[in-house]
């Protein structure tokens, strides 16, 4: 049979990145400021081949040994400002710092009505990120009518985390390259980097990457929000809460500080926890090859996004939590939206697929534990003795007993035998198969396990009995010896 044609890796990566499509161009002028333009300008003839990427990484290390990108240079008094992404420094550090200064210094006293509105607006903005930016647009885990998409785009802007287009593209790259140098918030680089550092520092264009976002560009709401992101962000994040608190509570300053600046800080930090804490805290019930983890504490902080191990295994499932007692308000919002007709085509992985992942991971953990224990020699590693070999060995080794086609040396166990020394003494040099297998005692799993550590040989013509005997404790063999 002639060799099958192989998939062209370059073409496959072009397709995965959506570079084969003529998408609508959407520009808002922030690409270079956010450090995104150089990170997505991919040469597919070279950058798409994964083997080439690894080789090129090593070549560029040598090439830029003297002329390195700023991200690879040590921090000094002369270049520290070049390391920083100044737009994100303003939005993530400077503006919230002003808010906290105003609040803690007493210059903006907190009113109860302003606090309650801030909490409400926080929840609306947070849900717009998790249900909108994340599960709707980034993962297409369900579909939504235009009024709901419009709401998510507007109030998502109020969280000051970038446009849907920018956020969704970064997140798809994260899933495509999880725990690699091309992961924008690579958890392997530390908790601080995955939490905030990736936004505040200039990324290395050497690790540029792309993902297919044609579906985002085809959404008129996404296009409009991206083109006009700055005015929409200022309006929804700061102007609107200031006006609401001022008009209804006569607290313009409090609205700006608490419902604006501090609320933005809190929602940003909560969202950042998805990239950081959700890759560090908790367990990994579905797969432990990558860093995502499930943890209820992270779920409380992130509107239900804390069941991150599940999410990375089943990214298009509209749920993060699958148990009734697990906290996932975003799942509830999506479901209620579907009941109102605003959302539809809610995607779920099958119960069978989820259980398969759980069982596979449980088996992997059991195999690790099993590998640390002494289960006795494998039958295939034992010599094969006939009766003459057995009798010859008995001349120097008096503690030999045959059970189900396997020779065991029990000399060091005679005084430990729960049934008494005399019973075991009476079996020395004999076949004790019937006695062991219920003729005298119905031995436990523990007895089988202890006995297995004493194996020294397999009896010729007794391989079938030995394999069946070993199968009782989970061993599996193909017949190969005692011929």
Image (cartoon, rainbow, N blue to C red):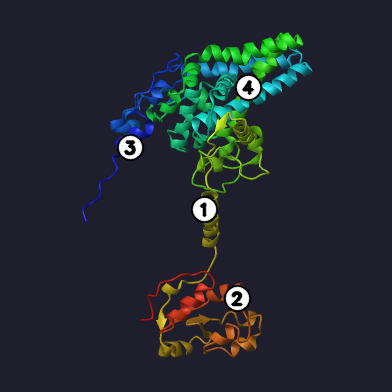
Q: Position of residue 353 (x, y in %)?
A: 51, 50
Mark 3 lies on residue: 12
Q: Position of residue 121 (x, y in %)?
A: 67, 21
How dense is the environment of label 2, judged by Cα within 10 Å: few (below 14), some, or many (20 and up)?
few
Is the C-beta separation of discs 2 and 1 under 8 Å?
no
Quadrant of the image occupied by residue 435: bottom right
- Label 1: which secondary element: helix
Of pointers 1 and 3, the one earlier in the residue sequence: 3
Identify which residue, 408 or 91, lies in the foreground: 91
Q: Earlier in the sequence, mark 4 or mark 1?
A: 4
Q: Earlier in the sequence, mark 2 or mark 1?
A: 1
Q: Earlier along the polypeptide chain: callout 2 or callout 3?
A: 3
Q: Quadrant of the C terminus?
A: bottom left
- Indicate whether 410 appears above or below 231: below
Residue plotted at (59% across, 26% down) = 128
Indicate left or right for 227 with 126 as reference.
Answer: left
Residue at the (30%, 35%) spot, across then down: 11
Mark 4 residue crowding within 10 angstroms, few (<14) / some (14–19) / many (20+): many
Q: From the top left corner, tell me how far across and down residue 106 is, in percent.
A: 76, 13
Q: Which residue is mark 1?
A: 356
Identify the residue position indicated by label 4 in the image: 265
Q: Nearer the viewer, mark 3 or mark 4?
A: 3
Residue 357 position in % (x across, y down) = 52, 50
Q: Kindly report the distance in space between the C-alpha atoms of the residues bearing marks 3 and 4.
A: 40 Å
Q: Residue furthest right?
A: 112
* Closer to the camera in the image, 192 or 185: 185
Q: CA distance from mark 1 to mark 3?
A: 28 Å
The residue at which mark 2 appears reads as: 447
Can see residue 374?
A: yes
Q: Pointer 4 and pointer 1: residues touching (CB < 8 Å)? A: no
How far is the residue under mark 2 from the one under mark 4?
62 Å
């Amino acid at each position: 049979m002639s060799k099958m044609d192989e998939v062209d890796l370059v073409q496959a990566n072009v397709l995965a990145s959506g570079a084969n499509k003529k998408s609508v161009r959407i520009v808002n002028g922030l690409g270079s400021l956010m450090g995104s333009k150089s990170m997505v300008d991919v040469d597919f003839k070279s950058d798409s081949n994964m083997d080439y990427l690894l080789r090129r990484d090593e070549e560029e290390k040598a090439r830029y040994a003297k002329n390195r990108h700023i991200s690879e240079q040590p921090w000094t008094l002369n270049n520290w400002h070049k390391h920083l992404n100044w737009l994100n420094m303003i939005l993530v550090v400077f503006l919230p710092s002003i808010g906290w200064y105003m609040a803690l210094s007493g210059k903006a006293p907190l009113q109860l009505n302003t606090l309650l509105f801030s909490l409400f607006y926080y929840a609306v903005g947070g849900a717009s990120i998790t249900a909108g930016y994340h599960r709707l647009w980034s993962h297409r885990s369900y579909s939504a009518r235009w009024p709901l998409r419009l709401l998510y785009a507007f109030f998502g802007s109020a969280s000051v985390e970038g446009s849907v287009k920018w956020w969704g593209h970064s997140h798809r790259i994260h899933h495509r390259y999880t725990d690699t140098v091309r992961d924008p918030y690579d958890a392997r680089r530390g908790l601080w980097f995955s939490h905030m550092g990736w936004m505040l520092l200039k990324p290395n264009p050497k690790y540029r990457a792309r993902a297919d976002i044609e579906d985002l560009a085809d959404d008129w709401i996404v296009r409009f929000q991206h083109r006009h992101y700055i005015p929409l962000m200022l309006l929804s994040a700061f102007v609107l809460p200031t006006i609401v608190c001022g008009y209804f509570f006569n607290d313009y300053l409090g609205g700006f500080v608490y419902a604006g600046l501090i609320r933005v800080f809190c929602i940003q930090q909560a969202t950042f926890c998805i990239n950081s804490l959700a890759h560090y805290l908790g367990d990994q019930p579905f797969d432990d090859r990558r860093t995502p983890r499930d943890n209820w504490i992270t779920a409380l902080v992130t509107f239900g996004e804390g069941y991150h191990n599940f999410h990375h295994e089943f990214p298009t499932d509209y749920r993060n939590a699958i148990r009734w007692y697990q906290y996932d308000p975003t799942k509830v919002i999506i479901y209620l939206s579907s009941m109102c007709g605003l959302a539809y085509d809610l995607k779920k992985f099958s119960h069978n697929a989820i259980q398969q992942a759980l069982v596979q991971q449980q088996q992997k953990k059991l195999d690790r534990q099993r590998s640390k224990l002494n289960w006795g020699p494998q039958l295939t590693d034992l010599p094969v003795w006939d009766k003459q070999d057995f009798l010859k060995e008995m001349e120097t080794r008096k503690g030999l007993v045959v059970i189900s086609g396997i020779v065991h040396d029990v000399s060091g166990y005679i005084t430990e035998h729960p049934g008494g020394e005399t019973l075991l003494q009476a079996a020395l040099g004999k076949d004790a198969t019937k006695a062991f297998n219920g003729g005298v005692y119905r031995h436990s799993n523990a007895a089988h396990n202890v006995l297995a550590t004493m194996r020294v040989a397999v009896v010729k013509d007794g391989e079938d009995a030995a394999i069946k005997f070993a199968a009782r404790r989970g061993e599996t063999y193909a017949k190969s010896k005692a011929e």
